[in-house]
Amino acid sequence: MINIFGKEEFKPIRRYEVIIPNYFVSKTGMVISTITKRERLLKLSKTKDRRKGGNLQYKMFVMQVNKDYYKTMLNDEYKLYSDSSKKFSLVMRVHQAVMWSWKPIDDYPPVPKEEWDQTPESVKQLIRESICIDHIDGNSLNNHIDNLRYTSQRGNNYWRKKNGS
């Protein structure tokens, strides 16, 4: 964990339990890059989720990631493009970066910790890749760690319908 900008604390960004080098996120959703000699606050973009009728907006950011690192550590070759560049752009939603970095699913599972510890690794991996992150207050632009929780797709939809979002 590092401290930048006064009291704001940042942790390395994780994706599926793997640390993405040179990128850090705060509990409030600020993202910094340390690729250059000086830390740089990344610009966050807003995008609409077309699957939800275009009503929900999310904050996103783009990271420059080494292809070889991505291939070996994240085992995600299908997202790689055929250009000759050693780096490529990886887009990530801020709420995912906050939750996966500050409350990793293995430390904060969606079921009691004792049950999680007894779950086979193959099932844990399926859960890690399919779990949803819900914005508790219904505001998809509020990415503070206290406003996020792990839930199923069903739980996420139920929450939206219950609150009229």
Image: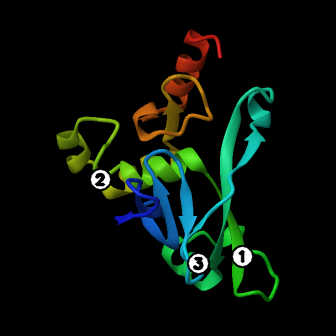
Compare marks 1 and 2 and give the one earlier in the sequence: 1
The residue indicated by pointer 3 is 71
Compare marks 1 and 3 and give the one earlier in the sequence: 3
Q: Residue 87 appears at what percent x and percent y?
A: 69, 81
Q: Residue 50 appears at what percent x and percent y?
A: 80, 35
Q: Callout 1 environment at 10 Å: few (<14), some (14 to 19), or many (20+)?
A: some
**Residue 125 appearing in the image:** no
**Mark 3 secondary-structure assignment:** helix
Q: Callout 2 environment at 10 Å: few (<14), some (14 to 19), or many (20+)?
A: few
105 with respect to 5 (left or right): left
Residue drawn at the location 54% of the way across and 75% of the way down: 34
Q: Decide which of 10, 7 is in the foreground and name it.
A: 7
The residue indicated by pointer 1 is 88
Disc 1 to disc 2, C-alpha distance: 33 Å
The residue indicated by pointer 2 is 120
**Mark 1 secondary-structure assignment:** strand
Q: Nearer the viewer, mark 1 or mark 2?
A: 1
Disc 1 to disc 3, C-alpha distance: 11 Å
Please identify the quarter of the rendering in which residue 163 is found. Answer: top right
Q: Nearer the viewer, mark 3 or mark 2?
A: 3
Please identify the quarter of the rendering in which residue 42 is found. Answer: bottom right
Disc 3 to disc 2, C-alpha distance: 25 Å
Residue 77 vertical placement versus 16 (above, below):
below
For badge 1, the amino acid type reads Phe
For badge 2, the amino acid type reads Pro
For badge 3, the amino acid type reads Lys
Q: Nearer the viewer, mark 1 or mark 3?
A: 1
